[in-house]
Amino acid sequence: MKQQSESNTRTLDEVRRQAVGRGNALNLDRILVPLDGAHRSEQILPFASMIADWFSGEITLFHSLPSTHPARGARPGQVHYPDAPHDRGAALAAAYLEEVVSRLGPHGVKSRWGIATGHAAEMITSRSATSSFGIVAIAAVPRSRSRRLFSLGLLDQLWKTTAVPLLIFNPRNVSLNGAPPRAPKSLIVPGGRRTTDSAMSMASALAGAGRSAVKLVLPGTRTDADSAVATENEILEFFSDDGVVAEIERAEGNLVEHVHSLQVANPGSWIVVGSKMRSGFSRSVFGSTADRLARDAAGPIVIVPNAKVTRQRMRAAHDATRDLATSL
């Protein structure tokens, strides 16, 4: 295990203030939380509220109504107008979201809500990209690789399209039992130097604002090769410059299993991992490091698309929104 050699002379308040500034530059003060009306989907709210508190931000509760085909529900020989059931659905969704907002308010959480009509993953992707959200927070149970070959869940669809980071909480793995979660004492950041690039800025902002330490987990045993030492020093210097306490640990054996064991051994810790957001057949069959981490994480995990993926998907989301507007 390798730790920072230089002590930080800044106060905790100074470190936090600077981290909040970095987080706001990443739009972490704007959190999009999709809710489907089920209690399970609401289990992400304590973690989203935590981020909102750290960055003095605001949560937007979001519900997507399915499009209603004009022929659906019509009797033979009759014309069916979907406006009435859609309006009822919108009214029910608005009442539900207002009720959730009223529950968050007494805890000092600023929140608003929004409703859109269309495919849920497409609406979430479009809203998050075009409205400058910094993170999409969602409670979801990742599907197995074999099941993904036949049907994709909302999380799988977002994995293919999102341009912004995902905060994922699996309600099956951990139950809050009505008790609010505590701020994480540590953030676990797995991967090599190249694969952690997209996650390091996120981890630094979250750790500084939440007053957490960072534990970087690199694959393989440590060597004294000049390149390996330089890489470790560069990573530690990055966090040291931000006033964040960090240390490097080498994974013994399987990287994913090592990270999962660390999260179990440190209750309340979060995983922050960069990803190329690979999708389709290759992900369904072989998976990826981020995919395997998300499937069996014992607590919250933040998936950060790398810069190239973010640029491509952000451009695609803006193009799709523009095409939709011109077609109306």
Image (tube, rainbow, N blue to C red):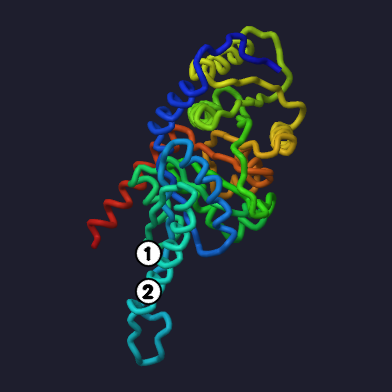
Q: Is residue 79 left or right of residue 288?
A: left
| Tag 1 near tag 2, CB within 8 Å | yes
Q: Residue 183 at what x, y percent from top left?
A: 59, 37
The mark that comes first in sequence, 1 or 2, is 2
Q: Split into 4 quadrants, where in the image is the C terminus?
A: bottom left
On screen, residue 93 above or below 313? below
Give the labeled residue for mark 1: 117
Which residue is at 74% across, 35% downward?
Answer: 265
Q: Can you say whether 115 is above or below 304 in the image?
A: below
Q: Quadrant of the N terminus?
A: top right
Residue at the image position 57 percent from the left and 34 percent from the top: 273
**Can you name the residue that lies furthest to the right here?**
253
Percent from the top left, x then y, of residue 206? 51, 32
Say what amino acid the circle numbered 1 marks: Thr
Residue 115 in percent (x, y) is at: 38, 61
- Side of 237 where 126 appears, left or right: left
Q: Position of residue 306 (x, y in %)?
A: 48, 33
Q: Which mark is residue 297?
A: none
Q: Mark 1 to mark 2: distance in Å?
A: 9 Å
Residue 286 occupies quadrant? top right
- Label 1: state its secondary structure: strand
Reading the image, the residue beneath label 2 is 86
Q: Is residue 162 above or below residue 177?
A: above
Relative to residue 295, is residue 125 drawn left or right? left
Residue drawn at x 69%, y 22% is 249
- Which residue is depicted at the point 61% across and 35% down? 184
Neighbourhood count class around disc 1 (C-alpha, 10 Å): few under 14, some 14–19, many 20 upward: some
At mark 2, the secondary structure is helix
